[in-house]
């Protein structure tokens, strides 16, 4: 695997065990279709049937494991790029809060000790403490600022 610059096109809300499981629709910025596809509506216009195929794949991919078909929220609609970026920002903020330890510091007393223990374990400081002698790998982000596409998603 690797990290590729992508353009966010939209998002689909799958329901997995009663919770939202967001599926972000993207296109590689180097894909031959990228110049023509900038938002979710462009996908249907340029590649008719692709969104239906994506939804059906997510609906059925767990069936071979003996699980029921997946369901979707928001009327099974794909939401546009602006909606997707809002969800991405919210999820990223929640992740930052968790790994920075901020979530643990602001939890208060309204959570039981098991939840607090889990949050503590997931915080950045705890994760690093579990692995002795861990520093940032010098090649971890060799092309960190090489993206020249303003629509590429980077954090």
Image (tube, rainbow, N blue to C red):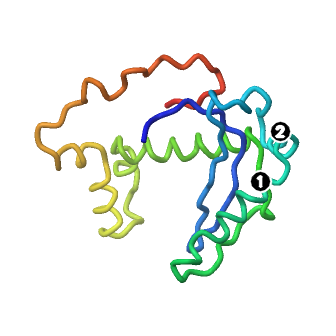
Using the image, tell me which numbered label, if any, was put on residue 42.
2
Q: Which of 129 and 13 is in front in this view?
A: 13
* Residue occupying the point 66% across, 26% down: 151
Q: Which of 86 and 36 is in front in this view?
A: 36
Relative vertical location of residue 51 with respect to residue 99 in this rendering, above or below: below
The furthest residue to the right: 45
Question: On the rendered structure, is 131 left or right of 32?
Answer: left
Q: Position of residue 67 (x, y in %)?
A: 56, 80
Question: On the rendered structure, is 89 left or right of 11?
Answer: left
Relative vertical location of residue 21 with respect to residue 34 in this rendering, above or below: below
- Say what secondary structure mark 2 lies in: helix
Q: Position of residue 28 (x, y in %)?
A: 62, 34
* Residue occupying the point 39% across, 57% down: 108
- Give the class, few, some or many, for how many residues have Cα within 10 Å of label 2's Cα (few <14, many ≥20): some
Using the image, tell me which numbered label, if any, was put on residue 89.
none
Question: On the rendered structure, is 79 left or right of 1?
Answer: right
- Give the class, few, some or many, for how many residues have Cα within 10 Å of label 1's Cα (few <14, many ≥20): some
Give the residue pinned by disc 1. 51
Q: How far apart are marks 2 and 1 (CA)?
A: 11 Å
Q: Nearer the viewer, residue 115 or 129?
A: 129
* Residue occupying the point 29% across, 25% down: 139
Q: Position of residue 2 (x, y in %)?
A: 43, 37
* Residue occupying the point 47% across, 17% down: 145
- Of marks 2 and 1, which one's residue comes earlier in the chain? 2
Q: Where is residue 32 in the image (x, y as percent from the top left)?
A: 70, 30
Question: On the rendered structure, is 24 left or right of 93?
Answer: right
- Say what secondary structure mark 1 lies in: helix
Q: Quadrant of the N terminus?
A: top left
The furthest residue to the left: 132
State the count of labels: 2
């Amino acid at each position: 695997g690797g990290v590729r610059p992508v353009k966010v096109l939209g998002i689909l809300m799958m329901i997995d065990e009663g919770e939202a499981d967001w599926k972000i629709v993207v296109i590689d910025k180097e894909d031959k279709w990228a110049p023509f596809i900038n938002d979710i509506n462009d996908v249907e216009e340029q590649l008719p049937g692709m969104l239906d195929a994506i939804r059906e794949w997510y609906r059925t991919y767990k069936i071979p494991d003996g699980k029921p078909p997946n369901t979707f929220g928001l009327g099974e609609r794909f939401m546009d790029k602006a909606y997707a970026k809002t969800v991405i920002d919210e999820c990223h903020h929640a992740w930052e809060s968790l790994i920075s330890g901020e979530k643990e510091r602001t939890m208060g007393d309204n959570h039981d000790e098991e939840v607090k223990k889990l949050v503590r374990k997931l915080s950045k400081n705890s994760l690093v403490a579990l692995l002795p002698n861990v520093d940032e790998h010098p090649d971890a982000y060799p092309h960190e600022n090489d993206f020249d596409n303003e629509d590429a998603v980077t954090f």
